[in-house]
Image (cartoon, rainbow, N blue to C red):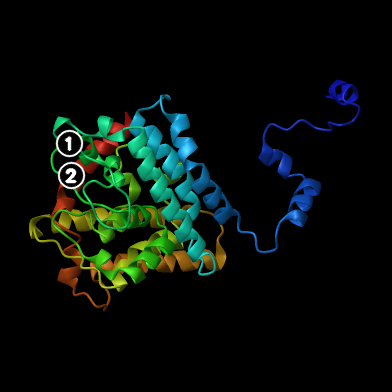
């Protein structure tokens, strides 16, 4: 190091292995902070940058190590993970950035011919669409088993993906504009189902962003489950024969989130807030407290299509463990 420093006449004092290591220097970090706007939001800034770079990121991964679909979803979720916070001040900017991501993802999915890989011969003529309206042709359906052309293709939407990833700001904004997004349907992955079971249960992509495969277990993630329920989402399913299976799976997800929270050291008041929020959602599903739902309604969760997805959960976990 001394030799390098002498060679460049003092221009290099230390070589760092990463930008993060360089930024940890107190003098460097103080200088960065002194030049940043007073109201800068790092997460929002990264989200906005991602919205502008998404198209190039998707094209840059075409032909990479993984499948076309996995590379596409890796790029999308890499930037969406920066939107998993709810800030009234930033809500408008978050919604604008996610709408932009939706448009770019739609165009990119068409450009790279994502349907070619994700649909069978019977669905080769599908033209992928975007937007907040539910559609069986939405690019989001390529994330799961139905995207491989295996039988019936359910409807989903950009709001559904936001619910999967705990992006509460987007869910709130779009529901205030169109409350009908809460309505379940026989051919639809409902907003409540997307929120309750999350990205990792809807997706078959094995190599997507770690942030997407392990959704945040903080207040936003849990509030995204709670919010549709409190807005009147119907938790019932038509086929009561599967209600216990669905109920136990949702409770298992909530219990796992609680365990991760309690195992995390420290936290103080924030940890208490998250724990309380998790328990409230669990009670909403179990009917163990007095709410707008009766106990029987609370366990009749989501919709008939859920049982098909629940039946594949064990198989998917086995695939990821291989």
Q: Is residue 154 left or right of residue 51?
A: left
Write down the residue under mark 1. Answer: 123
Residue 153 got which mark? 2
Q: Position of residue 60 (x, y in %)?
A: 47, 30
User: In terms of secondary structure, where does tag 2 sit?
Assistant: loop
Choose the circle earlier in sequence order: 1 or 2.
Answer: 1
Q: Is residue 316 above or below residue 136?
A: above
Residue located 83% across and 31% down the image: 12
Q: Position of residue 175 (x, y in %)?
A: 33, 67
Q: Is residue 83 visible?
A: yes
Q: Is residue 45 above or below residue 5?
A: below
Quarter of the image where the N terminus is located: top right
Q: Is residue 209 visible?
A: no
User: In terms of secondary structure, where does tag 1 sit?
Assistant: helix
Residue located 13% across and 34% down the image: 122
Q: CA gap, disc 1 to disc 2?
A: 10 Å
Residue located 47% across and 49% down the image: 81
Quarter of the image where the C terminus is located: top left
């Amino acid at each position: 190091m001394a030799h390098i420093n002498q060679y460049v006449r003092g221009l290099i004092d230390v070589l760092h292995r990463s930008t993060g290591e360089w930024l940890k220097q107190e003098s460097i970090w103080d200088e960065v902070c002194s030049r940043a706007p007073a109201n800068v939001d790092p997460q929002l800034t990264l989200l906005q940058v991602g919205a502008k770079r998404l198209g190039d990121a998707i094209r840059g991964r075409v032909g990479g190590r993984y499948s076309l679909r996995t590379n596409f979803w890796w790029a999308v979720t890499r930037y969406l993970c920066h939107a998993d916070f709810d800030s009234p001040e930033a809500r408008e900017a978050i919604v604008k950035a996610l709408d932009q991501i939706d448009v770019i993802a739609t165009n990119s999915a068409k450009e790279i011919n994502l349907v070619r890989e994700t649909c069978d011969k019977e669905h080769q003529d599908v033209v992928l669409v975007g937007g907040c309206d539910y559609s069986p042709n939405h690019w989001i359906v390529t994330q799961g088993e139905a995207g491989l052309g295996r039988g019936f293709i359910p409807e989903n939407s950009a709001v559904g993906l936001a619910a999967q990833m705990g992006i509460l700001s987007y869910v709130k904004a779009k529901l205030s504009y169109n409350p009908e997004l809460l309505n379940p349907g026989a051919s639809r992955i409902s907003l409540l189902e997307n929120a309750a079971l999350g990205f990792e249960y809807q997706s078959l992509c094995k190599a997507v962003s770690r942030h997407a495969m392990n959704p945040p277990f903080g207040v936003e993630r849990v509030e995204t489950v709670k919010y549709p329920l409190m807005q009147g989402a119907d938790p019932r399913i038509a086929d009561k024969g599967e209600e216990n299976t669905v109920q136990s799976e949702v409770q298992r997800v909530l219990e796992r989130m609680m365990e991760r929270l309690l195992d995390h050291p420290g936290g103080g008041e924030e940890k208490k807030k998250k724990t309380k929020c998790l328990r409230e959602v669990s009670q909403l599903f179990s009917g163990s407290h007095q709410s707008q739902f009766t106990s029987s309604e609370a366990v009749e969760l989501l919709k008939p299509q859920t049982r098909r997805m629940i039946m594949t959960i064990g198989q998917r976990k086995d695939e990821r463990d291989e």
